[in-house]
Image: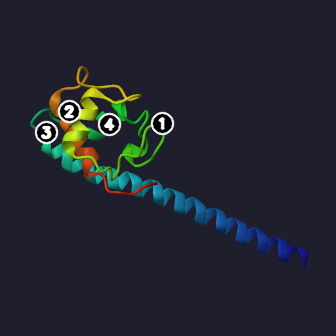
Amino acid sequence: MYWSRSRGKFSIGFFTAMFITWLSLSIARAEEDVTEIVAAEINAKYQSHKENFSVKRLFASRCSWCHQGYGLKQADGPRLAGIPKTKEQVVEQIMYGKTPMPGFRKQLKEWQIEALADYIKALPDVEL
């Protein structure tokens, strides 16, 4: 009888753990899928500037230190998905910064700043 009860508790715990694992992997894939879809559209727009351009790689190298989850999560910097700023305002902030964010006008080309602004504005208003 004791074996039966503990086996049942084990089964419930095991399946609960498996469900939580599945759910967390699904959320991680959803985050990746959303940003991949947005990035693919932006990459196609800027291919004429650089072959194999990846706005997601650019974002990861310059922005993800503070804006995590490729812009979908708040960290040291705010979540960028769904921000109410216009594209022009986003370009301005990327170029000149706003304390504590540095400006990138001297490190990035104008078209790279435009690509980042397009990416940020295209992110759906979701939070992970």
Is disc 4 in contact with disc 1, using a CB cutoff of under 8 Å? no
Q: Position of residue 105 (x, y in %)?
A: 23, 24
Q: Earlier in the sequence, mark 4 or mark 2?
A: 4
Instruction: Mark 1 or mark 2: name the one nearer the start of the chain.
Output: 1
Can residue 54 be seen from the camera position used here?
Answer: no
Q: Which mark is residue 59?
A: 4
| Mark closer to the chain start, 3 or 1 | 3
Q: State the CA–CA distance, disc 3 to disc 4.
A: 16 Å
Which one is earlier in the sequence, the residue at label 3 or at label 4?
Answer: 3
Q: Disc 3, disc 2: CB below 8 Å?
A: no
Residue type indicated by callout 3: Gln
Q: For mark 1, give the secondary structure.
A: loop
Q: Image point 36% across, 35% down: which residue?
A: 60
Dot 1 corresponds to which residue? 76
Q: Residues within 10 Å of mark 3 (few under 14, many from 20)?
A: few
- Is residue 79 shown left or right of residue 23? left
- Residue at point 53%, 57% (across, down): 24
Q: Position of residue 43 (x, y in %)?
A: 19, 43
Callout 1 crowding tier (Cα within 10 Å): few <14, some 14–19, many ≥20: few
Question: Given the current orientation, which residue lies at the most extreme right position?
Answer: 2
